[in-house]
Amino acid sequence: KSILYEMAKSQDLWKQRIAMMSTFYFIKQGEFDDALKIAKILLNHEHDLIQKAVGWMLREIGNRDFEVEYNFLKENYKSMPRTMLRYAIEKFEPELREKFLKGLI
């Protein structure tokens, strides 16, 4: 797993994206820690490909354990890019989605 952290911290967009997307394997195994740590590393990334990948993996975590995703978002949503947030909350109930988008959580 250490290579994923190296890739996430690199300056190469594609390595960063691979690092985030590779956590999907662990997410499917019910292991969320590495995905959340890498998401935190990439939290303020300016490129939409990274924002989409992080949001997608957060959504996948939520598909398996809503509370884990919710707690991560509650702590970080105000500092994450809008695209990342929108991908992450795509499947939330409309009322909860609105609260996140309006900064009311």
Image (cartoon, rainbow, N blue to C red):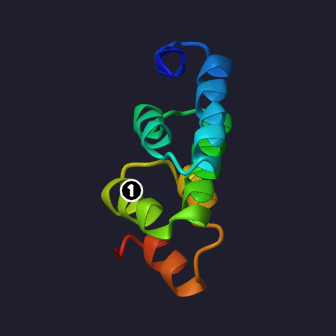
Picture coordinates of residue 21, whole percent (x, y): 66, 35
Q: Residue at x 54, y 33 (%)?
A: 46
- Whether 94 is drawn above or below 30: the answer is below
Query: As drawn, which residue projects farthest toward the front?
Result: 29
Dot 1: what SS? helix
Three-letter amino acid code at the position of disc 1: Phe
Indicate left or right for 46 with 15 as reference.
left
Label 1 crowd bin: few (<14), some (14–19), many (20+), radius 10 Å: some
**Picture coordinates of residue 40 (x, y %)?**
40, 38
Relative height, residue 58 to residue 91 (above, below): above
Q: Quadrant of residue 75?
A: bottom left
Residue 24, position as x, y percentages in the image: 65, 41
User: Quarter of the image containing the C terminus?
Assistant: bottom left
Q: Image point 42% across, 61% down: which residue?
A: 68
- Residues 39 and 78: in front is 39
Q: Residue at x 58, y 75 (%)?
A: 92
The quarter of the picture where residue 77 lies is bottom left
Q: Residue furthest left?
A: 75
Query: How many marks do you count on the picture?
Result: 1
Q: Which residue is mark 1?
A: 72
Say which residue appears at 44% left-offset and 49% top-offset: 80
**From the viewer's perspective, is residue 88 above or below residue 44?**
below
**Near-viewer residue (90 or 70):** 70
Residue 36: image x %, image y %? 44, 43
